[in-house]
C-alpha cells in the first residue's frame, strides 16, 4: 500500500494488495497498534529514532535521498510513485511488534526527512 501527499490531493493506492488494508489517518491512529503482541493488553511503542529498531515495541526510521535509493537499500519496490513523479527525500518508518528482529510493518513519508517522537502518539 502506498500513501503519499506531494501537495494537493492525497493519494492512497492499495491496488497491488491481496488482502484488505485498514488505515486510520486521524490523530493518534498509531497508538491503536499494539507494540507487543506477546503481552496481554495494549503496549505503547518506544521511539528509537535512527537506531536499529530490532526489539519488540521499537519504532524507528531511515531517510533516503530519493525513491530509488530507498528501494535499493530496502530491497523492495515502494509502490505508488517512481523517480519521475517525485524526486525528493523518502523516509520509511518501521515498527516491530513481535519477538523477532525484523520490522512487522512500515510506512513511507515523502518530503519529511526529520522525524521526532513528538510526531507520534505512542
Image: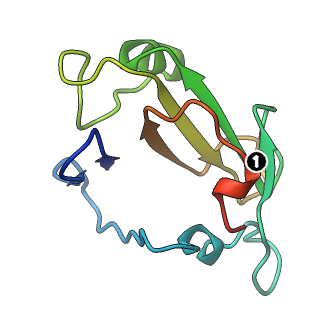
Residue 79 falls in image quadrant: top left
Residue 78 falls in image quadrant: top left
Q: Residue at x 25, y 53 (%)?
A: 17
Count of marks placed on residues: 1
| Secondary element at tag 1 | loop
Q: Does residue 26 lie above or below 102 as drawn?
A: below
Position of residue 45 in the picture relative to residue 3 (left or right): right
Colouring = rainbow
Spot occupied by residue 35 in the image (x, y as percentages of width and height):
73, 66
Position of residue 5 in the picture relative to residue 94 (left or right): left
Q: Residue at x 42, y 72 (%)?
A: 24
Q: Residue furthest bottom?
A: 41
Front in this rendered view, residue 55 or 110: 110
Q: Does residue 36 lie above or below 116 as drawn?
A: below
Front in this rendered view, residue 33 or 101: 33
Q: Residue furthest front?
A: 8
Spot occupied by residue 122 in the image (x, y as percentages of width and height):
72, 67
Residue 67 falls in image quadrant: top left
Q: Residue at x 38, y 21 (%)?
A: 88
Q: Which residue is mark 1?
A: 100
Position of residue 62 in the picture relative to residue 39 (left or right): left
Spot occupied by residue 120 in the image (x, y as percentages of width and height):
66, 60
Spot occupied by residue 20 in the image (x, y as percentages of width and height):
29, 68
Dot 1 crowding, Cα within 10 Å, few <14, some 14–19, many 20+: few
Q: Residue at x 54, y 36 (%)?
A: 92
Amino acid at each position: 500500500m502506498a500513501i503519499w501527499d506531494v501537495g494537493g490531493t492525497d493519494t492512497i493506492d492499495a491496488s497491488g494488495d491481496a488482502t484488505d488494508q485498514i488505515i486510520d489517518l486521524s490523530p493518534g491512529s498509531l497508538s491503536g497498534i499494539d507494540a507487543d503482541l506477546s503481552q496481554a493488553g495494549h503496549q505503547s511503542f518506544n521511539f528509537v529514532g535512527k537506531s536499529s529498531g530490532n526489539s519488540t515495541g521499537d519504532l524507528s526510521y531511515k531517510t533516503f535521498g530519493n525513491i530509488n535509493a530507498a528501494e535499493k537499500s530496502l530491497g523492495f519496490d515502494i509502490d505508488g510513485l517512481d523517480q519521475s513523479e517525485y524526486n525528493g527525500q523518502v523516509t520509511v518508518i518501521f515498527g516491530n511488534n513481535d519477538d523477532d528482529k525484523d520490522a512487522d510493518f512500515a510506512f513511507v513519508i515523502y518530503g519529511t526527512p526529520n522525524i521526532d517522537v513528538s510526531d507520534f502518539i505512542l
